[in-house]
Amino acid sequence: MFLTWLDSNSWLLEIGGKRILIDPWLVGSLIFSNLDWLFKGSRSQNRPIPDNIDLILLSQGLEDHAHPQTLKLLDRSIQVVASPNAAKVVQQLGYSQVTTVAHGETFTLNNQVEIKAFPGSPVGPTLVENSYLLKELESGLTVYYEPHGYHSTQLKQAAPVDVVITPFVDLTLPLLGSFIKGGNSALEVVRWLKPQVILPTAAGGDVAFEGLLMKLIQTKGSAEEFRSLVEKNNLSTRVLEPKPGDRFELPLEKRALAI
């Protein structure tokens, strides 16, 4: 199993002989609702569009997960699995193979990778987006992805999970509180799932952010602080910090419980 972090929430996961592109923002700026004065993310350089993508997996319909400029460059015939909100985005862009997965529903890719949707991040007062559990059917190895650190208790039924991808850092706004939860939230999911490996998402990489919101956002925590937290709680999970663009093989062992 191989992973490539492509900055922010964007990942290329090679699992079960398939190449799955997760929440891609690879080119151009990141702007919400055309309000660049409020928030704008910029890349030092565009990321190359990966070759031979078998599936695009979208957790949310917001621009930092379903980035329109990136999605317009990708082949519209690539199969997409998405939350209901994200499915609307790709359907409007002309993608021809879109599968919507609601919480609790499962999609299987060529009898090699199983993808199950769980409740993920709340977006607004009524909408809860998706997190995903991906399972390599031949080996039983599993990967859990939740980009904002909101973890459903329903996940406990999936333990143990081999790889967790979730934030380590808390990002908060005055009056609104945390909109990205790391630290204690990540520690809790490690206790639940007992992963072999955990990796950070949603922060860092070769990107720069500006705008009014950046003056208000407060950041708490780091990968090193989270690693210390894991050690203090006598948990065996390895905390890895990938470099953007580097493809690496995950150091995993098959476990008897991973069935």
Image (tube, grey):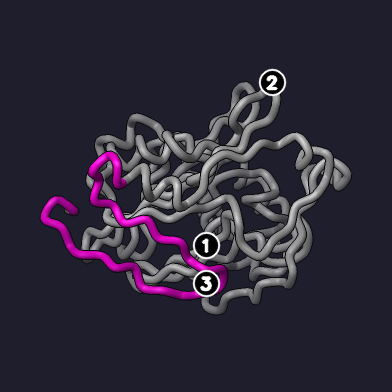
Residue 111: x and y in percent read 31, 63
Front residue (pair 72, 38): 38
Q: Nearer the viewer, mark 1 or mark 2?
A: 2
The magenta stretch is 231-258
The reply to whether residue 14 is visible in this rendering is yes
Q: Secondary structure under badge 2? A: loop
Identify the main secondary structure in magenta: loop
Q: Is residue 117 left or right of residue 214?
A: left
**Looking at the image, which residue is at 78% across and 39% down?**
215
Q: Amino acid at mark 2?
A: Leu
Residue 247: x and y in percent read 46, 75
Front residue (pair 106, 175): 175
Q: Secondary structure under badge 3? A: loop
Q: Nearer the viewer, mark 1 or mark 3?
A: 1
Q: Amino acid at mark 1?
A: Trp
The reply to whether residue 134 is visible in this rendering is no
Find out whether the residues at labels 1 and 2 contact each other: C-beta distance under 8 Å: no
Question: Badge 3 is on which residue?
Answer: 53
Where, by quadrant of the figure, is residue 183 drawn?
top left
Image quadrant occupied by the N terminus? bottom left
Question: Badge 2 is on which residue?
Answer: 175
Where, by quadrant of the figure, is residue 142 drawn?
bottom left
